[in-house]
Amino acid sequence: MRLRDRRQMEKPDIIIIPMIDIMFFLLVFFMLSTLYMVNLKTVDINMPQAAHVETQLKVTYVVTMKNDGSLWLEDKPVAETELLNKVADQQKKNPQFAVVVRADQKLDYGMVIGLLDKIKGAGVAKVGLAADSAGGQ
């Protein structure tokens, strides 16, 4: 039986590039997965669908109008006068203040326009309407 000479044995190579690739893949995976873990504080309603919906990330207030006409600021019920006071205060503090109104699709159109008009009357220039994506662009 012939034994190998220890002086002729090569040291094993440590290939680090595949390990770096795996670490970058894991980093990207966890970064993307945390984007979907954002807790959106809103009330569930049946919103209308639109094909060309834009996602707006710089929103300060999300106001929800339920089918019964009740108003919700984020996930808490709020009276209309209290909402308008908070909106006016925020507009004075931050000129880039934005409000998005989420309204139930069965809600009367006049009620939604009335709320938008009152929010505009409080001095807010950036007001938007929310809709669910219907799979368009």
Image: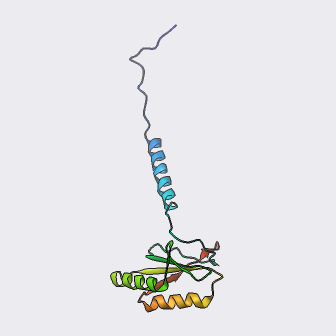
Q: Position of residue 48 (x, y in %)?
A: 63, 78
Q: Position of residue 66 (x, y in %)?
A: 59, 79
Q: Is 72 left or right of 104, judged from the image as shown?
A: left
Residue 137 visible in the current orientation: no
Q: Residue furthest left?
A: 93
Question: Foreground residue, 97 or 134?
Answer: 97
Q: Residue furthest top?
A: 1
* As drawn, 12 above or below 70: above
Q: Position of residue 39 (x, y in %)?
A: 50, 64
Question: Foreground residue, 84 or 20?
Answer: 84
Occupied quadrant, residue 53: bottom right
Residue at 58% of width from left, 89% of height from top?
111
Question: Foreground residue, 44 or 2?
Answer: 44
Residue at 64% of width from left, 75% of height from top?
46
Residue 23 visible in the current orientation: yes
* As drawn, 2 above or below 29: above
Q: Is 56 left or right of 132, judged from the image as shown?
A: left
Q: Position of residue 20 (x, y in %)?
A: 44, 45
Dividing the image into 4 quarters, which one contains the C terminus?
Answer: bottom right
Count of numbered circles on the image: 0
Residue at 59% of width from left, 71% of height from top?
44
Colour scheme: rainbow
* As drawn, 73 above or below 112: above
